[in-house]
Image (cartoon, rainbow, N blue to C red):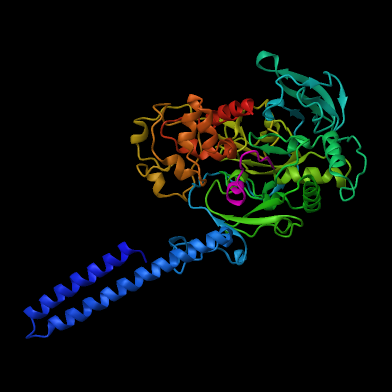
Amino acid sequence: MNNKTSKAVFTIVAVLSANASWAQAEGSSSGYGTYLLYGIIVVAVLVFFMIILQVADNLLVIEAKQSGVASKGANFSLFPNWKELFAPRLPEYLEGKPVTVLRRGHNINLEGEAERVLDESVQAKTFAVQPPNFPGISPIPKVMVEVGDEVKAGDHLFFDKKRPEVMYVAPVSGEVIAINRGAKRSISEVVILADKEIKYRELKAIDPESASREELVSHLLDAGVWPLIRQRPFDIVAEHDVAPRDIFISTFDTAPLAPNLNFIIEGQEEAFQKGLDVLNKLTDGAVYLGLDGRGKEQPHAAFTEAKGVEVHYFHGKHPAGNVGIQIHHIRPIGAGDKVWTLGVQDVATIGRVFTEQRFNAQRVIALTGAELRQPRYVRTYIGANVGDLAKDNLANDHVRLISGDVLSGKKKTAEGFMNIYDDQLTVVLEGDDYELFGWLIPALNTPSISPTLPSALFPKLKKRAETNMHGEKRAFVVTGTYESMLPMDIYPQELMKCILIGDFEKIEGLGIYELIEEDVALCEFACVSKQPVQQILRQGLDMMREQA
């Protein structure tokens, strides 16, 4: 105990003793003064003892941190912290497992969750590979096919002029019926009319156990599955000539109406494990699986019993299922680090390259949204036509089709195609109507975090999604809502403002390398200023990548 603390304790005891003596002199006839004196002395001794105990506790914690054992997350204090006292009740299957409990975030409950039924009758006729799906690719890649050409699944369609080793291939066999262009003659889509029976380009057999890393990389590049591997920072197609620090895979999704990956992985267990085996050969670090620890159901055995990986459970609200959040809490991205991320079905696709010797681009897609007659799961291929998937299933025609979820998905028309990394098609009401008195109406159907709306008082009440903004873009004010939505040690609002003014040094210091659009999508939902947060972040990522 230091001198200042000692003097403070002795001063308190002296003052209390003096007061007690005065009280005893005043009331000695009744004896109350004696009891008061003893009571005050006892309190002073307890205070003195607690100060000594607190100092000892602080020294114990400091020693634990200096020795390095405290970095494992254990509590070496003599007292339980408030997180332990008020921790949520976790399911039994998490006992003894590594769990991260997230305190921030927000769940948006919507009508239209897909029923766990796989409808094999829904068949798309056309498919497309879309260069804009791949951030960083040349706007005009080198196209290797022409309209009218016949292709097999796995045939090369185009390659990036900046990285000609990375091949982009056909997801199905059939005839190339269109090569659509966008602004400045950029290639937007290579469209294929699919055969009724898919034909595959046969790949050579290769044993991933005996093959070198260079041989595996070359095989994956030629097979066309390399673009399924994404690299952080910047969320670009992975660099084939760089070994990642680690590889991360999230096995659950917490976005609104998100597909259930426990259901999707059924029947793909062998391919998923083979994909994990291959990924282990591509990194000098570890392959991490983020597992669902929310307790609604135990994760599938394909995830919990996966071999050659490190598993980590996450308990909390959305965006707990985002792989970026999981990276931040398992092993954050530091300066110069490069990590890879994949989706569950992407891993299975890589595995099928070795179990089937072909590029099998099958996908199980969740059709979700209250504007569907029957939300359900369908089996199709990468890049399926959106209109074909939703055909004869729309409750009305005044809807918006979204590839992905309502927070970070992309608007599509019936002639459009699913984005390559999406396994969810969401159909919501097109909100182009004006509401009388706007936010003054106490509506229960408006998803919001604001307590000024009655819907915020009933967070578990499911709402019918629509696209009304409920306001327009306005001054970028500081409210603290961004920080309450993002369970990361990052100040997102300050980061967005620094991006807008182009302050490179602060942008880097505020943690932009750990983020992609889906991580801040919830911030955009909660933004009272109606700022395009995801668009601003992408602007910053592109800006920093150009400087790298």
- Up-down: is 19 above or below 61? below
Residue positioned 62% across, 49% down in the render: 331
Q: Nearer the viewer, residue 198 or 200?
A: 200
Question: Where in the figure is residue 35, as x and y percent of width and height?
Answer: 18, 82
Where the C terminus falls, by quadrant? top right
Query: Does residue 304 appear to the left or right of 27 in the view shown?
Result: right
Where the N terminus falls, by quadrant? bottom left
Is 229 magenta? The answer is no
> How many marks do you count on the picture?
0
Query: Does residue 520 appear to the left or right of 433 in the view shown?
Result: right
Q: Nearer the viewer, residue 532 or 42?
A: 42
Query: Does residue 286 appear to the left or right of 545 in the view shown?
Result: right
Is 328 magenta? The answer is yes
Extent of the magenta region: 326-340
Residue positioned 37% across, 42% down in the render: 453
Question: Where in the figure is residue 395, as x and y percent of width and height?
Answer: 58, 36
Tell me the quarter of the picture where residue 545 sits.
top right
Tell me the quarter of the picture where residue 484 sits.
top left
Query: Does residue 110 appear to the left or right of 542 in the view shown?
Result: left
Q: Residue furthest front?
A: 3
Residue 446 visible within the image: no
